Image (cartoon, rainbow, N blue to C red):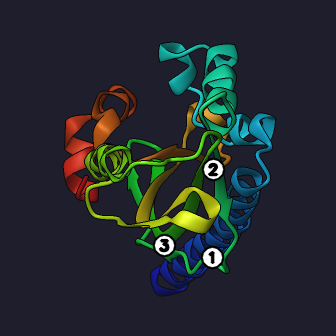
Amino acid sequence: MRLKITFLLLLFSGVVLAQNLDDLKKDTKTLYEATYNMAFETILDYTHPTVFKLVKREDMYTMLDTAFQNDAYRLRYVYTTPHFSYSEISSFNNSHYCVITYENAMRITYENKIESEESQKKIMATLQKNFPDASIRFEKDRNAFYIVKNDKLLAISDDETNGKWKFMNVNPNYKELLEAVITENVRKQLGL
C-alpha cells in the first residue's frame, strides 16, 4: 500500500512539474515576443511584482519607452527563433525558480550620422562596457550597432505571483535588483 501511495505521489509531482514547465515555456515565449514588439505593458505584466516595490511600474514603463526610442537612438530587438535553455525547476520555501538562457540580438540605430571614427569608437567602448561578453559590430550603412549577446532570465513562481511565472532579467549591471528579490542562499543555489 505504501508503495502505491509513493508511486502515485511521484507520478502526480511529475505531471505537475511537466505542466509547470509547459506554462513556463509558453510565458517565456510571450515575454520574448512582447520585448520584440515593444509591448511594454505586457513586459511589465510578466515582471515579478517585487520589482515594482523598488521601481514604480509607471517609472519602469517610462524607462523602457525611453530606452527603445529617444532623440539620440532607436533600440530594436532583431527577431530570431530563440533557443531557450531551461535549468531544472528548483523549489525553496514554497517558491519555484528556473534560470533561462538564450541568445539575443538587437540593433541600436543612431538618429544623427556617426561621422567620425572617434565617435564610433567611443560608442563602441560604452556598449562593450554595458555588454562585456557580447559580439558588437558597427553597421555603417545603417548608422547602427548590431549586438549579439547571451541573456539570462530568472523565472519565479511564488505566493506574490499567485503561482504564475513572472520574470526578472539577470544582469550584472542591476545586481541590487536581483538581491532585493531573492535571498543570497537562493541565488547561490541557482548559481546566480
Residue located at (50% from left, 47% from top): 114
Q: CA distance from mark 1 to mark 2?
A: 14 Å
The image position of residue 180, as x and y in percent, is 35, 25
Residue contact between numbered discs 1 and 2, judged by CB atoms under 8 Å: no
Up the image or down, 142 lies above or below 66; here it is below
Instruction: Give the left or right position of residue 63, taking residue 185 as reference.
Output: right
Q: Amino acid at mark 3?
A: Glu
The residue pinned by badge 1 equals 18
Location of residue 142 (image quadrant): bottom right
Q: Position of residue 93 (x, y in %)?
A: 38, 42
| Residue beneath disc 2 | 165
- Asked if disc 3 and disc 2 are in contact, CB closer than 8 Å, the reply is no
User: Residue 187 vs residue 93: left or right?
Assistant: left
Distance Cα–Cα, label 1 vs label 3: 24 Å
| 67 relative position to 170: left or right | right
Amino acid type at image mark 2? Trp
- Mark 1 element type: helix
Outermost residue on the front side: it is: 115
Q: Which residue is mark 3?
A: 103
Is label 3 or label 2 in front?
Answer: 3
Determine which of the numbered discs, if any, sits on residue 152 in the image.
Answer: none
SS at mark 3 in the image: strand
Q: Using a 10 Å C-alpha cutoff, classify the residue at mark 1 as few (fewer than 14 neighbours), some (14 to 19) or many (20 or more).
A: few
Q: Is residue 3 above or below residue 108?
A: below
Tell me the residue at 71%/59% (across/down): 27
**Residue 105 appears in view:** no
Q: Tell which of 140 and 22 is nearer to you.
A: 140
